[in-house]
Amino acid sequence: MTEYDAIIIGTGQAGPALARRLAGLGMQVAIVERGRFGGTCVNTGCTPTKTLVASAYAAHLARGGADYGFSAGDIKVDMKRVKARKDYVVGLSNGGVERSLKNLENCRVYEAHARFVSPREVQVGSEVLTSDWIFINVGGHAAVPDIPGLDQVDYLTNSSILDIDFLPRHLLVLGGSYIGLEFGQMYRRFGSEATIVQRGTRLVSREDEDVSAAITDILTQEGITVVTDTKCLRIDKQGDDIIMTVDGRGSSELRGSHLLIATGRRPNTDDLGLDRAGVKRDEHGYIVVDDELRTSVPGIWALGDCNGKGAFTHTSWNDYEIVAANLANLFDGETRRVSDRIPAYALYIDPPLGRVGMTEADVRKRGRPALIGKLAMEDVSRALEKSETAGFMKILVDAETKEILGASFLGSSGDEAIHCVLDTMYAKAPYTLLKRAMHIHPTVAEFIPVMLDDLVPLPGSGTG
């Protein structure tokens, strides 16, 4: 049995940063990784997918060269080179994480699977490690639904699709949210036919209806078939085709060459021995944590995707910041909490969607008087100059306190411009502060004050 000051299970976004911080304080740290270093973001999430999105964007832009005054000829995508570029970028990232941890003073790296033996003991291979502080950062994996026939076909997930170096003739995508939409558009731009199948009545149903409608319009204009309000009944293989039998507006069949399952994620908590440690999980397998990310067992914390508190790289990093600050007063000496953060995320189709705070539906549920401002991207000069006029921006404001409640920016640079709003929200400043700011021209962000100068009552919010 080997004793450490801290044991960290997993090397996703939160784990390595926490290891560096604790080791830097002179603590003896063990960090355990059973697979590739860097976790979901580096290996099967943000880094590879956004690298592929960039390649797809370049091909799409080249095909539209005539709109910019040039011709690039017949655009052919070499998927082997696309994958090689992705692999190179991923290798830089996960290799960097691995080297930094293995060269970290006061830190020992274990490459094996970790399982709890007791609340203070973790078995790693043939060795048992013990510590009063244990941090779980094990991430998640693709959730695969129970569909008759699915186990008889070679379906793809968000992880396995990253390994292919060829172009699917027709990609069927089951799931109309973030993963499904990004891969659907990406492969359509590479040259595949693409069909997205969504069980709900609209794509990305967590967003407002106008956002869902605009996203659907963007995808269909690129030749993607979008099928909503449809349940997949079974999957079959017929020759070189995969057949999806669906029940929507009458039963029918959808035919493609490959199938991507994009129906959500599950935490990697099934094989950690959490029951032997007494760590509680919820009905979805997520580790139950409090506002400071402490589990049901004192001395054990859960960070990142496995705690169900965000499932984004930035929320995982913020988990690290919260835990590190509360353990060692490394920042302001104040307690930090999960509830302090404002929901913020992006959908990386092109153009991207940047989202912060509440939706219109959220605001209406509050029943508080609210104001809304909205601006079409075709009225934004920077977007017009780039011929990227799809989408719109909208912002929601509390009519009484003047604080910003939320915003949705679907359009060129929407994922970047949204931070002007997010920072103002964290400052708890009135919208008038942002309204009076002088922004640089020509940018997308300069039109935020324009929206704020033309606010109107939000229907159904208690303003009338």
Image (tube, rainbow, N blue to C red):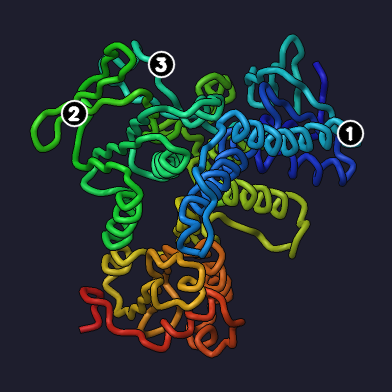
Q: Is residue 205 visible?
A: yes
Give the residue displayed 38% in from the left and 29% down from the top: 261
Q: Is residue 293 visible?
A: no
Give the residue displayed 54% in from the left and 90% down from the top: 436
Indicate which disc residue 103 carries.
1
Left or right relative to 276: residue 234: left
In the picture, which quadrant includes the C terminus?
bottom left
Q: CA distance from mark 1 to mark 3?
A: 40 Å
Residue hosting label 2? 246
Residue 408 found in image quarter: bottom left
Left or right relative to 39: residue 109: right
Q: Amino acid at mark 2?
A: Val
Q: Amino acid at mark 1?
A: Asn
Q: Position of residue 163 (x, y in %)?
A: 56, 25
Number of numbered discs visible in the structure rendering: 3
Other-residue count near label 3 (Cα within 10 Å), few / some / many at <14 / 14–19 / ≥20: few
Q: Position of residue 58 (x, y in %)?
A: 55, 49
Give the residue displayed 86% in from the left and 39% down from the top: 27
Nearer to me, 442 or 403: 442
Q: CA distance from mark 3 to mark 2?
A: 19 Å
- Mark 3 touching mark 2, by CB under 8 A? no
Q: Secondary structure at mark 2?
A: strand
Q: Position of residue 234 (x, y in %)?
A: 23, 20
Nearer to me, 294 or 85: 85
Q: CA distance from mark 1 to mark 2?
A: 53 Å
From what the image shows, is residue 87 above or below residue 243?
below
Q: Amino acid at mark 3?
A: Asp
Left or right relative to 6: residue 218: left
Mark toward the start of the polypeptide (1 vs 2):
1
Residue hosting label 3? 154
